[in-house]
Image (cartoon, helix red, strand yellow):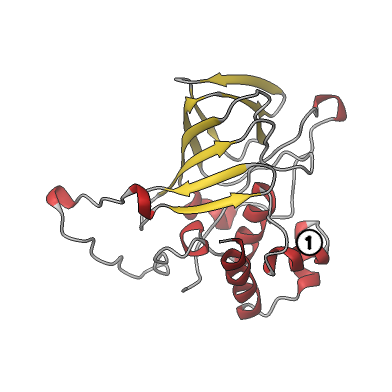
């Protein structure tokens, strides 16, 4: 899966005529890191992946090989005829992406719509990145923790989430997640409105760093958008 993700990112970059150096410079990372992600030699962190897809203008669905979101102004394809226009995605068909530092995404109910829906798993000690930076993205973030314990750092506040707890905040606020426990943390995430608002956001390279005294184990989450046919 990592090789597929890397090749899709590389194809998107080349289609847009962007060099490794220019992308790396925009995101504030090394050209070597971008190259290693594209060739599948390195698993990206959540923050690096989101920064790349945002900068390149592709969606999570497209990155995972799911049917692409139609360009703006294009009618969405008709859903498979099911009772009450329900679209069912079987568990075995979930697109899966394993990332650096023990984070796994499973894409839920993929398709055209206003929300990105994910089943997210954090292994013990896992975080959204290892770079020590808080980041932000367009949209409104909702989550419900199914099991385990997860720490959310939202600007200068810290919250411990346990099974049954839920959250909701404007994702433009700098935030990060880390599993500081000895057990798996797993939850359902929805990010609503990210696709519509992305163009108004600062560039993917613009990051928020909390004051040094607020950074313990660092993590972050960013964003994704539309445009690649795969």
Which residue position holds label 1? Answer: 33
For label 1, count other residues whose C-alpha is less than 10 Å away and answer few (under 14), some (14-19) or many (20+): some
Q: How many marks?
A: 1
Q: Is residue 109 visible?
A: no
Observer-nearest of 161 and 226: 161
Residue located 40% across and 47% down the image? 108
Q: Residue furthest left?
A: 83
Rendered position, 21 above or below 43: below
Question: Element at badge 1?
Answer: helix
| Image quadrant containing the N terminus | bottom right
- Expressed as whole percent of the image width and height from the top left, the position of residue 178 reads 67, 31
**At x 47% / y 47%, what residue is drawn?**
106
Query: Which residue is more in the foreground, 45 or 113?
Result: 45
Q: Is residue 169 left or right of residue 151?
A: left
Q: Position of residue 193 (x, y in %)?
A: 46, 47
Specify whether residue 55 is in view: yes
Of 9 and 104, the residue lying toward us: 104
141 displayed left or right of 20 = left
Q: Position of residue 145 (x, y in %)?
A: 48, 27
Q: Quadrant of residue 58?
A: bottom right
Relative placement, left or right, of 70 versus 75 is right
Estimate the x, y position of residue 91 in percent, counting from the top left: 35, 47
Q: Quadrant of residue 18?
A: bottom right
Does residue 161 appear left or right of residue 158 in this picture?
A: left
Residue that protrudes farthest toward the right in the picture: 212
Q: Quadrant of residue 224?
A: bottom right
Identify the residue at horizontal 14%, vertical 48% (top origin): 84
């Amino acid at each position: 899966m990592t090789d597929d993700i890397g090749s899709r990112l590389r194809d998107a970059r080349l289609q847009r005529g962007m060099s490794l150096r220019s992308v790396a410079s925009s995101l504030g990372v090394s050209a070597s890191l971008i190259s290693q992600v594209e060739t599948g030699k390195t698993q990206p962190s959540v923050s690096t992946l989101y920064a790349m897809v945002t900068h390149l203008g592709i969606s999570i669905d497209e990155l995972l090989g799911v049917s692409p979101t139609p360009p703006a102004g294009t009618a969405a394809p008709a859903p498979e005829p099911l009772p009450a226009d329900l679209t069912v995605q079987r568990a075995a068909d979930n697109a899966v992406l394993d990332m650096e530092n023990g984070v796994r995404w499973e894409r839920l109910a993929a398709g055209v719509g206003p929300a990105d829906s994910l089943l997210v798993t954090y292994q013990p000690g896992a975080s959204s990145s290892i770079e020590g930076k808080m980041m932000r993205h367009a949209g409104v973030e909702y989550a419900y923790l199914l099991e385990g314990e997860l720490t959310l750092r939202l600007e200068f506040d810290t919250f411990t989430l346990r099974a049954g707890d839920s959250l909701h905040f404007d994702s433009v606020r700098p935030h990060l997640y880390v599993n500081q426990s000895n057990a798996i943390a797993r939850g359902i995430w929805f990010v609503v409105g990210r696709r519509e608002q992305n163009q108004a956001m600062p560039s993917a390279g613009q990051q928020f760093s909390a004051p040094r005294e607020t950074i313990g184990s660092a993590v972050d989450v960013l964003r994704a958008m539309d445009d690649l046919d795969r």
